Image (spheres, grey):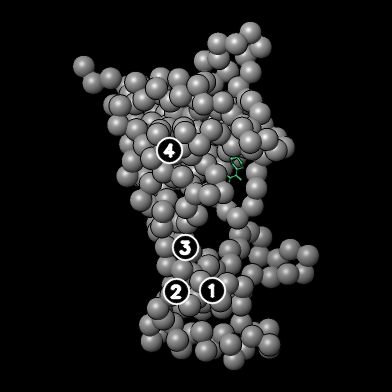
């Protein structure tokens, strides 16, 4: 008999001392729906449950001295072994500022993995021997310091999930998006036609689909040129786009764009 878990595309196991934080993705929005539809599966292992000491402490002072505490190796090691025994083909990911910087094209690669174990560190980080012996990939969500890896893991799961076929209804709404093309999205408008004396660009009400496409592409190019010139440099402009961007530049001070 085909069991109801068969269609699960990605299995996530998260090693964290704060599993409740993940309610932010398990209980809300599209990620919550993806779990209910069993497209993704998320469960947790708390290293505190693998401690052997009386106080269930998961941290200790750093060898060599210095401020802060380090997550002890043993409870993490036990958690990872347990996780691996359930997900036999898993990639083990540690979130840290030392990791590879996460970009949209990385997300597109990560969705190919079927099983991912995330290690969420707290304090000053985890014992290096865990990284050396257990971790397959280190990822960073950006060049800033967080208080723990949980938010970073949630960001990774969130952005991976929305890329899985069936999680977001319209395939087009994923493909259309900025980063795959190194262009920012065009502006969006919805009803009503007028709010507080501000109207919707006439062309969007015209029903002329080829004009609408050109307008959106021009806005998209113009916005990227204005706000993210670094992205635009990576985008190879075709003839049509060169003309549209020049048009945008020409009128940018005249507010008729
Ligand atoms: N931390 N991208 C330190 C991060 C981080 C990041 C997570 C802080 C791990 C121990 N994680 N803990 N940036 O700043 O992923």
Q: Distance between the residues labelled 1 and 2?
A: 7 Å
At horizontal 49% and vertical 29% (from top left) the residue drawn is 14
Q: Which of marks 3 and 4 is nearer the N terminus?
A: 4
Q: Earlier in the sequence, mark 1 or mark 4?
A: 4
At horizontal 21% and vertical 16% (from top left) the residue drawn is 1
Q: How far apart are marks 2 and 4 (CA)?
A: 35 Å
Q: How far apart are marks 3 and 4 (CA)?
A: 33 Å
For label 2, the residue is: 234
For label 1, the residue is: 230
Residue 9 can be seen in this image: no
Q: Position of residue 210 (x, y in %)?
A: 42, 76
Q: Distance between the residues labelled 3 and 2?
A: 10 Å
Q: Which of marks 3 and 2 is nearer the N terminus?
A: 3
SS at badge 1? helix
Q: Badges 1 and 2: C-beta atoms under 8 Å apart?
A: yes
Quadrant of the rendered image containing residue 176: bottom left
At horizontal 64% and vertical 52% (from top left) the residue drawn is 144
For label 4, the residue is: 132
Residue, far right: 196
For discs 3 and 1, the disc positioned in front in the rendered view? 1
Asked if the residue at label 3 sits under 8 Å from ligand 1, the reply is no
Q: In this view, does 194 lie to the left or right of 242?
A: right
Residue, far bottom: 250
Q: Distance between the residues labelled 3 and 1?
A: 12 Å
10 Å crowding of disc 2: few (<14), some (14-19), many (20+):
few
For discs 1 and 4, the disc positioned in front in the rendered view? 4
Which numbered tag is attached to residue 179? 3
């Amino acid at each position: 008999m085909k069991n109801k878990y068969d269609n699960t595309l990605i299995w996530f196991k998260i090693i964290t001392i704060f599993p409740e934080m993940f309610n932010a993705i398990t209980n809300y929005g599209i990620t919550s729906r993806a779990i209910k539809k069993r497209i993704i599966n998320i469960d947790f292992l708390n290293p505190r449950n693998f401690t052997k000491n009386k106080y269930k402490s998961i941290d200790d002072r750093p060898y060599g001295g210095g401020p802060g505490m380090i997550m002890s190796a043993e409870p993490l090691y036990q958690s990872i072994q347990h996780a691996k025994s359930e997900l036999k083909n898993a990639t083990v990911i540690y979130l840290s500022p030392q990791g590879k910087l996460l970009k949209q094209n990385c997300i597109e690669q990560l969705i190919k993995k079927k099983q991912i174990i995330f290690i969420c560190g707290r304090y000053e980080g985890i014992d290096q021997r865990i990284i050396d012996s257990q971790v397959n990939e280190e990822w960073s969500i950006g060049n800033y310091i967080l208080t723990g890896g949980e938010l970073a893991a949630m960001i990774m799961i969130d952005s991976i999930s929305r890329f899985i076929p069936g999680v977001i209804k319209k395939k087009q709404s994923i493909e259309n998006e900025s980063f795959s093309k190194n262009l920012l999205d065009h502006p969006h408008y919805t009803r009503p036609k007028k709010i507080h004396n501000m109207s919707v660009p006439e062309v969007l009400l015209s029903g002329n689909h080829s004009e609408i496409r050109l307008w959106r592409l021009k806005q998209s190019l113009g916005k990227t040129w204005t706000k993210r010139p670094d992205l635009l440099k990576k985008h190879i402009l075709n003839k049509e786009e060169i003309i549209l961007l020049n048009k945008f530049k020409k009128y940018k001070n005249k507010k008729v764009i």
